[in-house]
Amino acid sequence: MANVCSVKRPTKFEEFRFIGDRRTQVVYDVDNIEDESIINELLAAEWVPELGGPAYTCFAPDTLFEARNRGYQPYRGNGSGKAGVDPDGDAAA
């Protein structure tokens, strides 16, 4: 599958594909997201008092499986914002 990224990976996460929002338990696939404002807003919310830390997190290993293992749900499929996209990379039937 070709990389359709229109968003450059954030500097502090340039080695990570999946970034999670700790406030909502949603994970974003930065390589396939089309609306960069989502990631920009997430990273702008650096410190969340209720969480005792930043609003965002990354995963090691950097996989969707690991994000799901930690209770995160993919953002509208694989993070592209498109409905009907399988989070594992296949088009939904």
Image (cartoon, rainbow, N blue to C red):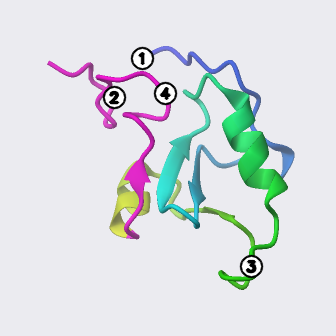
Q: How crowded is mark 2: few (under 14 residues within 10 Å), some or many (20 or more)?
A: few
Of callouts 1 and 2, the N-terminal one: 1
Inter-mark Cα distance, 1 to 4: 17 Å
**Residue at 65% over, 49% down:** 16
Q: Taken as a whole, is the magenta stretch helix, strand or loop?
A: loop
Residue 69, percent from left and from top: 34, 67
CA gap between label 1 and label 2 equals 8 Å
Q: Is there CB contact under 8 Å for labels 1 and 2?
A: yes
The mark found on residue 89 in the picture is: 2
> For residue 71, which quarter of the picture?
bottom left
Residue 86 in view of the camera: yes
Span highlighted in magenta in the image? 70-93
Q: What residue type is labelled 3?
A: Gly
Which residue is pictured at 42% across the width and 60% down the height? 72
Cα separation, mark 4 vs mark 2, equals 13 Å
Q: Where residue 1 is drawn, which disc sits there?
A: 1
54 sits to left or right of 3: right
Secondary structure under the numbered disc 4 in the rendered image: loop
Indicate yes or no whether the magenta region holds residue 15: no
Distance, label 3 to label 2, CA atoms, is 31 Å
Residue labelled with disc 3: 53
User: Where 93 falls versus 72 (above or below)?
Assistant: above
Of the two numbered discs 4 and 2 in the rendering, the one whose residue sits closer to the viewer: 4
Give the mark, 1 or 3, whose residue is nearer the N terminus.
1
Looking at the rendered structure, the kind of residue marked 4 is Gly
Which label is found at residue 81? 4
* Alpha carbon distance from label 1 to label 3: 35 Å
